[in-house]
Image (tube, grey):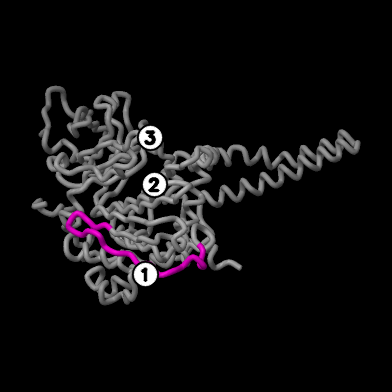
């Protein structure tokens, strides 16, 4: 594109390859239509809110033109307008100030200066997309969708989704997800096994400003799952595609959404097209929040060392220095090599010149509450339910003992002790779930005895 780079408040230019793009910012199911939601995209603070009159989601700059406070701290008022928390200025879906309580009747404040900056939005495949650049250019850029999910007549997809705000750059996440050879080691005992490690003879099949494609003929697990095909759609969508014969076609879809330097939102989708209906039926029995806990364990396998690694690379010169800083010794590194070649030849780094924030300790890196649970309808609901029911479950063992006292027969004794034991076990499990929804333990399964 020939558009000028996007300029932000910090006077940092975002390359056009990143700025003039659509990004998914949230799953629609996790957005609350009754209140505004804050989100940061490419260093710009946004407020997402449901425009009742326009029947659509809006994304405004998260700053009131009056006294510059964040509109995300406000509310959706009875008229369906976005209302500032400071003085009650209210805005409609176009960004126009529709209510200014302090103005005298007949006053006409400047429409330009009293309006909010607005970004283009779109809904597709269960996601809310925001265009990071000039809204006038949004129509010329296609949404980064997964076309396979819209295929007709080829069987239904069963899709598992998750998201998490990660303490790393979007490029670091993309580098990690593209690298297929780390799975047997990093994710040993979660989704991989060390004994499945083998040479990865991958080859690049296309490359250009729009991204690249890769082919791995043998595929994972020493060829047991079939060939794997990888597509990187610049700047933030990467997907793997393989067909395990006799089981399913499996996609791994990752959006790396740049929040700010050293932080991104991972939006991950795992579509399956099973050859049998049974696997999907079984997977549907597991609550979404339990699936998300499993996803957290996989993400935390490599979160600690990726947070460290990107700071080492920064000290050596960033992506521009990657071909020299890394020792890319085998064909398995073709993915990482292609990604950095795209950055250096076509895309640039989104936050070039901005230093990474200080390194976080292990406990901060294991946070799940602020990075996911607070923003996830399923997980926040589960945490609330656990808090509500835990006192009752904690009282049940005493109820079992009371049953023993009231029914001093062998049957009463057995029933009371069974109730007490089951209640105690359930209480322990609820305590564990409560902890898991708040933070990880920081000890990856690969390192456990």
Magenta residue check for 394:
no
On the image, the x and y values in percent for residue 418 come to 78, 42
Q: Earlier in the sequence, mark 1 or mark 3?
A: 3
Q: Earlier in the sequence, mark 1 or mark 2?
A: 2
Residue extending farthest to the left is 2
Which stretch did the figure color magenta? Answer: 193-213
Residue 296, labelled with which disc? none
The structure residue drawn at horizontal position 85% and vertical position 38%, both measured from the top left corner, is: 404
The structure residue drawn at horizontal position 61% and vertical position 68%, both measured from the top left corner, is: 449
Residue extending farthest to the front is 246
In terms of secondary structure, where does tag 1 sit?
helix
Q: Earlier in the sequence, mark 2 or mark 3?
A: 3
Q: Which residue is mark 3?
A: 32
On the image, the x and y values in percent for residue 108 come to 11, 28
The image shows residue 206, relative to residue 70, as above or below, that is: below
The image shows residue 333, relative to residue 23, as above or below, that is: below
Dividing the picture into quadrants, the one containing residue 120 is top left
The structure residue drawn at horizontal position 29% and vertical position 42%, both measured from the top left corner, is: 147
Q: Dot 1 surroundings within 10 Å: few (below 14), some, or many (20 or more)?
A: few
Q: Dot 3 surroundings within 10 Å: few (below 14), some, or many (20 or more)?
A: some
Q: Which residue is mark 1?
A: 309
The image shows residue 188, relative to residue 294, as above or below, that is: below
Label 2 and label 3: CA atoms lie apart by 21 Å
On the image, the x and y values in percent for residue 3 come to 10, 51
In terms of secondary structure, where does tag 3 sit?
loop
Q: Dot 2 surroundings within 10 Å: few (below 14), some, or many (20 or more)?
A: some
On the image, the x and y values in percent for residue 229 come to 33, 55
Magenta residue check for 196:
yes
The image shows residue 128, relative to residue 216, as above or below, that is: above
Q: Which residue is mark 2?
A: 269
In terms of secondary structure, where does tag 2 sit?
strand
């Amino acid at each position: 594109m020939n558009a000028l780079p996007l300029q932000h408040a910090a006077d940092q230019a975002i390359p056009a390859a990143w700025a003039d793009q659509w990004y998914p910012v949230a799953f629609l199911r996790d957005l609350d239509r009754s209140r505004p939601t804050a989100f940061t995209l490419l260093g710009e603070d946004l407020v997402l809110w449901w425009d009742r009159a326009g029947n659509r989601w809006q994304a405004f700059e998260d700053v009131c033109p009056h006294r510059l406070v964040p509109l995300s701290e406000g509310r959706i008022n009875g008229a369906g307008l976005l209302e500032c928390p400071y003085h009650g200025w209210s805005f409609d879906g176009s960004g126009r100030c529709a209510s200014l309580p302090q103005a005298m009747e007949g006053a006409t404040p400047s429409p330009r200066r009293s309006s909010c900056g607005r970004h283009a939005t779109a809904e597709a495949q269960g996601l809310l997309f925001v265009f990071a650049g000039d809204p006038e250019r949004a129509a010329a850029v296609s949404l980064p969708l997964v076309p396979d999910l819209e295929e007709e007549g080829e069987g239904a997809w069963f899709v598992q989704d998750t998201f998490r705000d990660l303490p790393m750059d979007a490029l670091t996440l993309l580098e990690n997800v593209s690298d297929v050879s780390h799975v047997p080691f990093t994710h040993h005992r979660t989704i991989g096994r060390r004994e499945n490690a083998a040479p990865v003879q991958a080859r690049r099949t296309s490359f250009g400003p729009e991204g690249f494609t890769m082919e791995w003929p043998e595929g994972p697990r020493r060829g047991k799952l079939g060939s794997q095909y990888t597509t990187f759609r610049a700047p933030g969508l990467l997907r793997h595609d393989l067909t395990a014969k006799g089981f399913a076609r499996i996609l791994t879809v990752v959006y790396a959404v740049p929040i700010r330097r050293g932080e991104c939102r991972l939006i991950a989708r795992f579509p399956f097209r099973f050859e049998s209906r049974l696997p999907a039926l079984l997977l549907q029995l597991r609550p979404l929040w339990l699936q998300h806990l499993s996803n957290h364990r996989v993400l935390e396998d490599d979160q600690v060392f990726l947070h460290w690694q990107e700071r080492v690379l920064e000290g050596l010169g960033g992506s521009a220095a990657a071909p020299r800083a890394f020792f890319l010794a085998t064909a398995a590194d073709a993915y990482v090599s292609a990604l950095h070649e795209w950055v250096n030849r076509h895309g640039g780094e989104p936050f070039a010149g901005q230093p990474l924030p200080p390194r976080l300790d292990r406990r901060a890196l294991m946070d799940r509450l602020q990075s996911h649970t607070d923003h996830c309808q399923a997980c926040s609901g589960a945490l609330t339910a656990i808090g509500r029911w835990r006192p009752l479950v904690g009282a049940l063992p005493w109820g079992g003992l009371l049953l023993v006292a009231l029914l001093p027969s062998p049957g009463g004794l057995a029933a009371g002790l069974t109730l007490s034991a089951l209640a105690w076990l359930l209480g322990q499990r609820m305590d564990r779930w409560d902890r898991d929804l708040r933070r990880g333990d920081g000890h990856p399964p690969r390192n456990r005895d």
